[in-house]
Image (tube, rainbow, N blue to C red):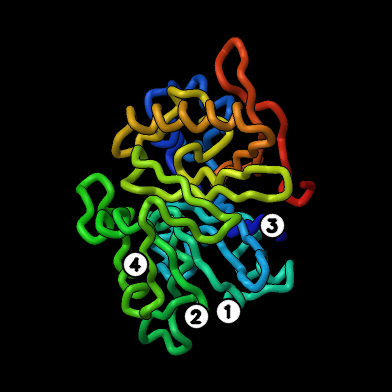
Amino acid sequence: MKLYTIETGHFKLDGGAMFGVVPKSIWHKLNPADENNMISLAMRSLLIEDGNRLILIDNGMGQKQDDKFFGYYYLHGNHSLDKSLSQYGFSKSDITDMVLTHLHFDHCGGSIEWNNDRTKYQTAFPNATYWVAEEHWKEAMAPNPREKASFLKENILPIKESGQLALLKEDDNISDTVQLGVTHGHTQSMIHPIILYKDYTIIYMADLIPTQAHIPTAYVMGYDVRPLVTMQEKEDTLKEAILTENTILFFEHDPLHEACTVHQTEKGVRVKEQVLIKDL
């Protein structure tokens, strides 16, 4: 097995929304805001080469939306999905498994693209099975008012129409080395792939702990549909990470820090060591 960090680009969201009840005087020191109170965030995917399978976890925002849409999110930086894949000698047609942690647009927008003459949408990974949690798919098909704006039909419906969709139950796994954790605080049935790599256990945090700054229990996003559930799920995940030797948390949205280990301190669970996947 080989692992590759895939950077798909950076965008901005409101800092207050990202940190919920935590005062700006505190979170601003961790992720400084611009004059519009927006903070920079990564869209970081993970690519797993496992035998004859090439498994990609999440794919960023994509490129098919119009300028008005992208203008809300201040896309910046030089990274893109295609550039990052090609850096390792891969293309989107090589992907065999596209694992979507959840269907909010900044995690699954790259799933679908325009065809050559921009007359209809098509799957961006023509040879991949698209894996989505079954209960989450149901939620995306009939979204609650709080999440409705994050579930874009052009990101979701073409997956089913393509015949490439596969729905996962909570006790399913992608492979022997890629297991599935599931949480429900940020959104219903969000997937957390757990990768067993060498002597390490790598947890893809998605939006449970979107950045390293969100490790403290109270640091919960305003976007979460069940914030108290998120807090408990964070506590459980971090406790397990401390108990399980060589556990690494992989951050999808941290603008600077790719991954880390954690330990217990007098102030609670905190970062122990920074980690780069390529160094493992």
Q: Secondary structure at mark 1?
A: helix
Name the residue: 56% across, 55% down: 178
Instruction: Find disc 1 in the rendering and name its residue.
Output: 93
Q: Nearer the viewer, residue 114 or 50?
A: 50
Residue type, mark 4 in image: Ile
Q: Secondary structure at mark 2?
A: loop
Q: Secondary structure at mark 3?
A: strand
Q: Nearer the viewer, residue 19 or 39?
A: 19
Circle 3 Cα neighbour tier, 10 Å, few/some/many (<14 / 14–19 / ≥20): some
Give the x, y percent position of residue 179. Answer: 52, 52
Q: Nearer the viewer, residue 260 or 77?
A: 260
Q: Earlier in the sequence, mark 2 or mark 3?
A: 3
Do tag 1 and tag 4 residues touch (Cβ < 8 Å)?
no
Question: Could you give the CA–CA distance between mark 3 and mark 1, rounded to whole angstroms?
Answer: 18 Å
Q: Earlier in the sequence, mark 4 or mark 3?
A: 3
Q: Secondary structure at mark 4?
A: helix
Residue type, mark 1 in image: Ser
Question: Residue 156's mark?
Answer: 4
Q: Earlier in the sequence, mark 3 or mark 1?
A: 3
Instruction: Find disc 3 in the rendering and name its residue.
Output: 3
Question: Could you give the CA–CA distance between mark 2 and mark 3, rounded to whole angstroms?
Answer: 22 Å
Instruction: Find disc 2 in the rendering and name its residue.
Output: 126
Q: Kindly tell me whether residue 263 is visible in this rendering.
A: yes
Do tag 4 and tag 2 residues touch (Cβ < 8 Å)?
no
Do tag 1 and tag 2 residues touch (Cβ < 8 Å)?
yes
